[in-house]
Image: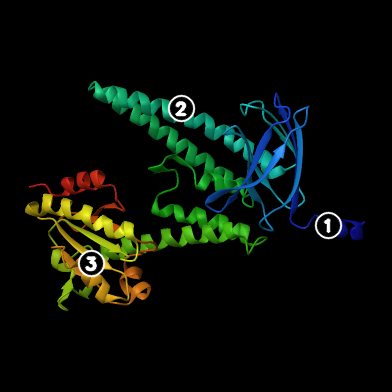
Amino acid sequence: MAAAALALASCNGKKASIDLRLEGAAERDVVLSVLNINKVEVADTLKTNASGKASAKFELPYQSPNFYYLSYNGIQLASLLLSPGDHVKVEVDTNGRNLKVKGSKESELLQQINREIDKSQKSFDSLSVQMIACSEIGDVESVQRIRYELGKLYVAQKQAAVKHLVTHPYSFTNIRNLYRQFNENFPMFAELTDGVYFKQLADSLKVEYPQSPYVKALEKEASASFNEMELSYRMKETPQALFPELSITDTKSEVRNLTSLAGRPFILLFWDPSNNEQKMFNAELESIYNQFKGRGLEIYSVCITTDKAYWHSIVNRFPWINVCDGDGSASSSLRLYNVTKLPCLYLFNKKGEITAKDVFDKNGLAKAVSAICVE
């Protein structure tokens, strides 16, 4: 029996298979896509027969559970979480309704989560529309009531996600919850202390899947949260100013201290001159600077490059504080301010407190700057 099981595992390797029955779609193409960490890629196309049935056997990209999606005519039919050796059966109609999934425990568990998420998302969207409508007519009381309902919904959903993590500590379905967003600006796990949940899941999954790229992504997320917490702690403990000191030379080789801006609203920007979009952002920043410099705004712009001559040629026209230590990605300023990707922007008020981070939309940044440049 053991020899037979071993032989079967050897034959399966990293392979999984799908048997699909798509109601009302005879001889049609169904797209099978796979999630490659943060990018969905087409893996195959399934052709249904006259009865709307199709089958596929394929190799998984990782020796661990993998996220797959079936779609038809641009409509997502099913989300699957397939492990090596899974033989999953899927029944669904062309609108993604009446979905039935069998043969994959992780996929079945994922369907439960997705149903709850879809239900709560509809409530969230409905309440959001109501709040906007009430706000437009000046119904303050209703706005406050709806905001309270939104808060209750958020707390309930987060508690449910944490409970799922505790009751299913070794399930990849937790990834769906941890990276959930109510909208593009409202992730469910965005608090600095939420890093503990990413670490908890990473530690659990790492036992069986130490090389999984999902585990590495979770570890990176946890590390970023903990580093941000450390930065926040350092800022609270720093005397004189609430932010750690930077002392870097400018275009005239003069040392410019960040703490010299204490008591003023300012922008701290880290950027890479080799990226055209980041260079163009400086032009947008110039109009904001000109608009608010009379109200005390200053900018401390840290260029991350080893080519100081190139940097100098770009920033010479900009009137704010431009600095560069020439160390590129090895710059100690990146570690000091927990910069994990470029560009990175912090907005400080007159008290030296961070009021916003990574606001690169021109109108959004202007609004955030206006709020801290109160006369």
Q: Secondary structure at mark 2?
A: helix
Residue ID for mark 3: 314
Residue ID for mark 1: 11
**Three-letter amino acid code of the residue under disc 1:** Cys
Which quadrant, please, contains the N terminus? Answer: bottom right
Distance CA(mark 2)–CA(mark 1): 46 Å
Q: Secondary structure at mark 3?
A: helix
Q: Quadrant of residue 239?
A: bottom left
For residue 35, side relative to residue 128 (left or right): right
Q: In this rendering, which labeled residue sits more in front, label 2 or label 1?
A: 1
Residue ID for mark 2: 123
Residue depicted at 12% across the width and 53% down the height: 290
Residue 204 in the image: state x and y as whole percent.
Answer: 61, 57
**Three-letter amino acid code of the residue under disc 2:** Ser
The residue closer to the viewer here, 278 or 77, is: 278
- Going from the N terminus, do you reach mark 1 or mark 3 first? 1
For the question of whether residue 105 can be seen, the reply is yes
For residue 121, side relative to residue 84 (left or right): left
